[in-house]
Amino acid sequence: MRVPSYFVDEDARMTVSSLFGLLTEISNRHASCLNAGWHQLRERGYFWVITRMRMEIRRLPEWTEIVTLRTWVRESQAATSPRDYELLDTNGNILVAASSVWAILDIATGRPQRMSAFDADFPMQKRCATEHSPQKISAINTQETNPTPLWVQASDIDMNRHVNNAHYIQWAFDSVDRDFRMTHRITNVTVNFMSQAKLGDTYTIRSEADSDNTFRTAIVSANEPKEFCRLQTEWQTI
């Protein structure tokens, strides 16, 4: 594919949220080819959710650059399905490597289903794309970085009627100081999805520095004691 203009930022490079959206899109396309995509599961009363993702970023592609994205499924565990990705340039160099963890939930009850009932037709690979698997991110103890509650908008909602996962990523990156972003490049992103925000919910954003270049960010409900999402980001000085 050729990177479109609506995938890039002011530096004409693909944004992390656009990258995340691209990874989730190819996940559904691949699953659909194996009779386990969004439509096929919906007919059976189920849907896919992503619970964790780690992206190791060597370089974000530029506007109009031609890239190739590939994905594969690794051996499933009891209630989760690991899926990996590689984004390559025209010379076959890996620009981004990513590993994710997915689960299948019952639409009516929200309960996870055993993967053994769904993965019979999935070809498995043992190779892991990333050096580190997506781990649990520790809680943040600081107060809100942005103390003003923000509303979930209609444009944030996806086909499952909760906030599109890529929007959490965008919210988190929007909270990063612009001067910092202009002098650093992102190298690693780990995301934990913890609960689903819906239309009309309010949220705040908290952030905590683990070092000069490593941060944890939490997107939390403004009205309830729950978190929607946690991120850990690692940056490198340009």
Image (tube, rainbow, N blue to C red):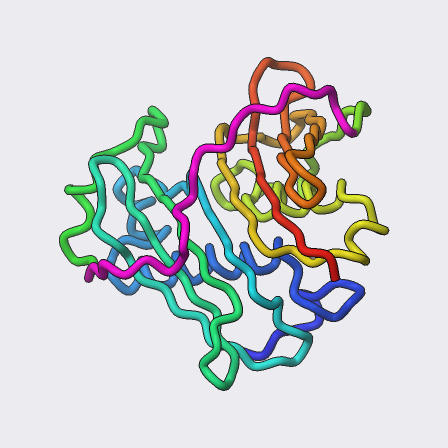
116 relative to 149, above or below: below
Give residue 181's position: percent from left, percent from top. 77, 53
Give whichever of 54, 14 is nearer the camera: 54
Give residue 44's position: percent from left, percent from top. 26, 42
Query: What residue appears at the point 16 percent right and 42 percent down from the top-left corner?
Result: 117
Query: What residue appears at the point 20 percent right and 36 percent down from the top-left corner?
Result: 78
Segment colored magenta: 123-145
State left or right for residue 164 relative to residue 106: right
Query: What residue appears at the point 52 percent right and 61 percent down from the top-left corner?
Result: 22
Give residue 31's position: percent from left, percent from top. 31, 58
Query: What residue appears at the point 61 percent right and 41 percent down from the top-left corner?
Result: 168
203 relative to 46, above or below: above
State left or right for residue 170 relative to residue 149: left
State left or right for residue 121 relative to residue 174: left
Give whichever of 32, 229 is nearer the camera: 229
**Residue 129 shown in magenta:** yes
Location of residue 214 by image quarter:
top right
